[in-house]
Image (cartoon, rainbow, N blue to C red):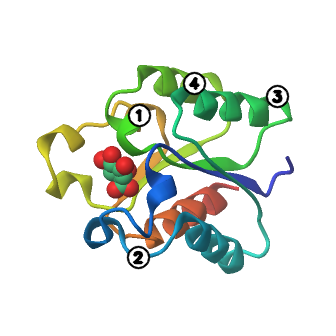
Amino acid sequence: MSATSILVMNGPNLSRLGKREPEVYGSLTLDEINRGIAGAFPEVTFEFFQSEYEGALIEKLFEVEERGGCAGVVLNAGAFTHYSIALRDAISAIKAPVVEVHLSNVHKREEFRHHSVLSAVCIGVIAGFGVESYHLGVRALLLRD
Ligand code: DQA
């Protein structure tokens, strides 16, 4: 990947966007969200990846790293945010900066969503702005580039 490449990675249940709790997560599908991101930043080469599986997300981070890295990762890890030490360790193991993003404001929701095991190894956290959370995540990475 070149210096202007960004990986946008989504974890479990985000494949259901559009159908899943639209009052919480909005009505756009993940595909529509990804197309919106690509359209908003034509100068960036994006890779989009989603999986329901923790190991697949970790493997994707290492695959990108082995290929020479990227300018950064915008990561919505879904529920893994709150308990995946394995994903946290994988983020620590790569050079690319990672921005943690959430569609919903996790701090306004159930208490178990208030804690992220990933935040401490990410460069920052953006939550609560719906689809814009991803766009802000990309902008945060471009500011450092
Ligand atoms: C989420 C928030 C998480 O708590 C939840 O498990 C998700 C989506 C969000 O984008 O708001 O799957 O990451």
Residue 142, x across and y down, in percent = 65, 62
Helix, strand or loop status at disc 2: loop
- Residue at horizontal 25%, vertical 53%? 106
Q: Which of marks 4 and 2 is in front?
A: 2
Residue that badge 1 annotates: 118
Label 3 secondary element = helix
Q: Which of marks 3 and 4 is nearer the N terminus?
A: 3
Task: Give residue 25's position: percent from left, percent from top.
Answer: 35, 66
Tell me if residue 116 comes above or below residue 70 in the rendering: above
Residue 95 in sight: no
In the rendered image, the vertical position of residue 117 relative to residue 28, given as above or below? above
The residue that disc 2 covers is 27
Disc 3: which residue: 66
Residue behind label 3 places its C-beta within 8 angstroms of ligand 1? no
Task: Give percent across and percent down for residue 2.
Answer: 86, 50
Q: Position of residue 132 (x, y in %)?
A: 46, 72
Q: Nearer the viewer, residue 99 or 143?
A: 99
Indicate left or right for 36 with 3 as reference.
left
Q: What residue type is labelled 3?
A: Glu
Query: What distance separates the C-alpha of mark 4 from that of mark 2?
Result: 31 Å
What kind of element bears circle 1?
loop
